[in-house]
Structure formats: structure tokens, C-alpha cells
Amino acid sequence: MISSLDWVIPSEMLAEEFDEKWDNSPKPFYNESFLSWFSRLAKANCADILGLFQILVEKGKGRPCALNQIELNPILRGILISQLEPFIDIDPTSLKKMFFHHYRKTSSKIDWNYLITIQPSPKYCPICLKTDTEPFFRDFWQLPFVTICSRHKSLLFDCCPHCNSPVLFWETSWDKPLTTCSNCHQDLTEGCKFLWKPRSHDGIKFQDQLLNVYMTNKYQNQPINVRSFFQKIWKLATAESGDPKVKKIEKNYRFLPSERIHKALYLAYKSLQSNNRNIFNSAAWDEINSYPKPLRKVFEELKTASYYFQTEGRNPPFVDHYNLPKNFFRVFCKLLSKQENLQKAFTTAGGLKSDFGLAWGVIQVRRYYEENHCPPYSKYHPFCSIAYFSESGAFLNSSISDWSSFLKKALGNRVIYCRINKNFKSKEGFKRVCEYLKEFHQKHNRIPLAKGLELKFVNKAVRRGIWAQFGIKNWDDLIRHVFGKK
């Protein structure tokens, strides 16, 4: 009688090298993922998928977790294809041309790259797998924004319908079909009695547009930065969605169900349609509509030039035409995409050094004065940057060497500030202050108060006693001198 020990396969046989062509070499289907094709190849030749991967790939790189990430690793895929080449009857160039994803998983709690972060397990359409002549998994089923089967107009399943475990088809046994659940060993296409279908076809149409952008790196036939594009889509979706799980993706709840993502993207699509907006028309650019016509025209050119830089990857003629720093667009586009703050992106990238930087700074100061009825403080943004560039000599051609001279350029006689107290000490300076207080009274129809924010610097000058020679020792003395006994 043969003992059970006689059936043990020596470890040397597991590592035995192949020396002849394999009997079956299934060709990859259109839109099939590389991992799906490799799994079909292993099963067609009665081999364990993980075991075959470890034999073909050298030790250290052939770990099971590496097989899971092969869609993101073109180097490892190239090694595997070169090892398979002597044994399969397929042109290796066709395998190398199979689509692979560029965007890796990140570890941040809130990730704006969510829509292009590959999921650890693919979604699937049970009808597709059941009607395929040979079931296979599509390469785009691992993308979070792909939630609907465009062919059957139904929601994709993101787990086993029997045990709710992830779909890890590469961990199934060599003698089981690819559609078998690796956990409960039941058929993934059976038991799917309820197929959720979207109420509108607009969501499917929008998904197809997003998938085309992802595959071609083009939007409306123009090359774009795919990462930046999908970041804007996801920010819009989270803003429009009332779902708390969508608004804040926690680290322990990174992957959302397909139905939640579909509803969030549908709301983003409706927002784009109702507002007639282009996804690149960020709200950060809306403020340029309030600029004077000449400056608004320049910023419209800047807007076009920034898109040119994002698509072409090189500086447009706008840089040399307006004397901008060479690295302006690299910093400007990065900050604008990340923070969506036009003022901060413009000043940080060195936009004040341009030919129109002075005009932009003057507009910012005047707008602040009109809203607050006092000059801005140089320690707040964007005035801190304007003061820095003023003192750095960016506006010397306009006789501006510091923050004081910039305010005088922007506001003229309306500006009163403490950094030129020597001008206050003269008779002309005291007369100018009195005129300013009279204008304030006419404008606001009240006697100015010492505690008012707009008169802070005047009160500070009074307390310093620079007008003591005129009999002004406190605020009441100044008011009586200007307005009489009131």
C-alpha cells in the first residue's frame, strides 16, 4: 500500500525550469487587464497563478503583493513578459502595449487623487462575465470613477454577492474558473438578483467622457494634465455631494461603494451643465471680472497661457512678453491647482515682477481701501508680498522704493500712516490731517472716533505729541481744533 509520504512533491520539482513551449497561449482581449490575461494563461496551462509568478520572477520581486500591484509597475511587467516569451505563442510587443495605470495609491487621509487611485480589487459586471465567451476582467474596472457598465447600463459590483469579500481573482485555485470567489469559492455571476440601474443616462455619458480623458490624456481634443483634471472633478463632486463619507474619505474607509461615487459624480456633472462651466474654469479666476478692462485683458491672457503651460509643459511667449520669472508658471499652476487662490499663487510665483505687477498691486490696495475705509496693513496677504517687492526694487521705475511710497502711489492724499511722522510734524502735514478728518465727517456724517480702525494711525500720531506745538495734546484737542466745540 502506498503511504501518504509517497505523494509529497519535492520542493526541487516546484522550481523546475520550463524547457518547452506551453500547450495553450490565450491572447489578450481588447480592454483586458494584464493581471486578468496572466491569470487566464496560468489556468489554461494548469498552473497556480501565484506559484507561476514566483517561479518566473526572481526571488524578492515575485512576492504575492507584487502581483497585486503589477498594473502599476511597468518594470515588473516587462520582466514577467521577457520570462514568458520563450514559452508562449504570442508576440511580446502586443503584451507590452497593454494599458497600465500611472497613478499609485497614496496614504493621505483626504486624497484629491481619489478618482485615479487604483483600487486593490476590481469591480465587475456580472452580466459581462456571464456572457463572455471566456470571462475576463477589464482594465478600467479598477478605477474608482468607473461605476456603471456602459454596455448593460447597470451598477458594477465591488464585492462577492455571497460573502461580501473583495474580488481577488488571481488568488483562485488553478482548477477553478476566473469568476470564482477566492474566499467562499462560489460563482461571482450567480446570486446577483438585484442590479441597480441609474435613473438617467447622463451619468453614464459623463463616465464615458472621464474614461476617454483618462485613456487619451485629452479633454475636448486638447492635451491636459490628467491628475489636475481629476482633482478638480473630485473637488467639485465632494462640494456638491451631501454624503459625509464622500466629503471626508478617512484612511480606514478609503474605498467607497460604487453607488456613492456614481451619485457624487452625477451631481458634479449636473453642476457643470447647469452653470455652463468648463472644468478648467476654476472659481479662483472669477475675481478678474472685477478688474479694470486693461488689467482684465492681461489676466485673460494669463489664464490662457497657464493652460498652455499645463498642456505643453513649457513656458508660453507670455513669460518673455511681460518680463515674468522663468519659473513663474511652474510655481503659479502648482499653487493655483492646490489652493485655488489666485492672489497667493500670483504673488508667490513672482508675478509682481512683471510689467503689469504694479497695476495689479494698486488695484488690490484701492479695493481694500474702498471696502474698509483705511489703508491696508503690510503684514497681511497679499500686501505683505507687495511691500516685499516694493522694498526689493521691483517698482523703482515708478519711483517706489518702500511700502509708504507704494501707498502714496495707490491712494494719493487719502493715505495717512505712521511711517512718515516727519511729514506730520510740519504745518502742511497738520493741515492735511485736518482736511482728511473733514472729508471723513462729510462721507460718514459723524464726528470721527479715536477708536475707529480707519483713524488708528492719526490717533497714534496724536498720542506721540507731534502736534503739541499746535496745542494738540490729545484726541479731543484735535477734534475741537477741526470741528470747533461739538
Image: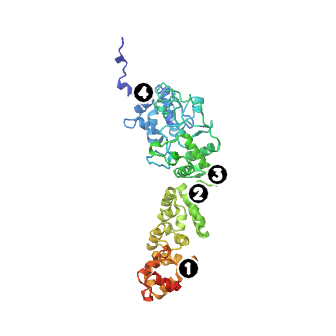
Under tag 1, what secondary structure? Answer: helix
Q: Position of residue 199 (x, y in %)?
A: 64, 41
Q: Earlier in the sequence, mark 1 or mark 2?
A: 2
Vertical comparison of 372 with 175: above or below: below
Q: Which residue is mark 4?
A: 19
Could you say which disc has been placed on residue 281 in the image? 2
Q: Position of residue 158 (x, y in %)?
A: 53, 36
Amino acid found under the numbered disc labelled 3: Gln
Q: Earlier in the sequence, mark 1 or mark 3?
A: 3
Q: Is residue 233 visible?
A: yes
In whole angstroms, how far apart are the C-alphas of marks 3 and 2?
13 Å
Q: Nearer the viewer, residue 448 or 3?
A: 448
Q: Earlier in the sequence, mark 4 or mark 2?
A: 4
Q: Which residue is mark 1?
A: 441
Could you say which disc has been placed on residue 63 in the image? none
Q: Which residue is mark 3?
A: 273
In whole angstroms, how far apart are the C-alphas of marks 1 and 3?
50 Å
Vertical comparison of 89 with 215: above or below: above
In whole angstroms, how far apart are the C-alphas of marks 4 and 2?
60 Å
Q: Nearer the viewer, residue 93 or 195?
A: 195
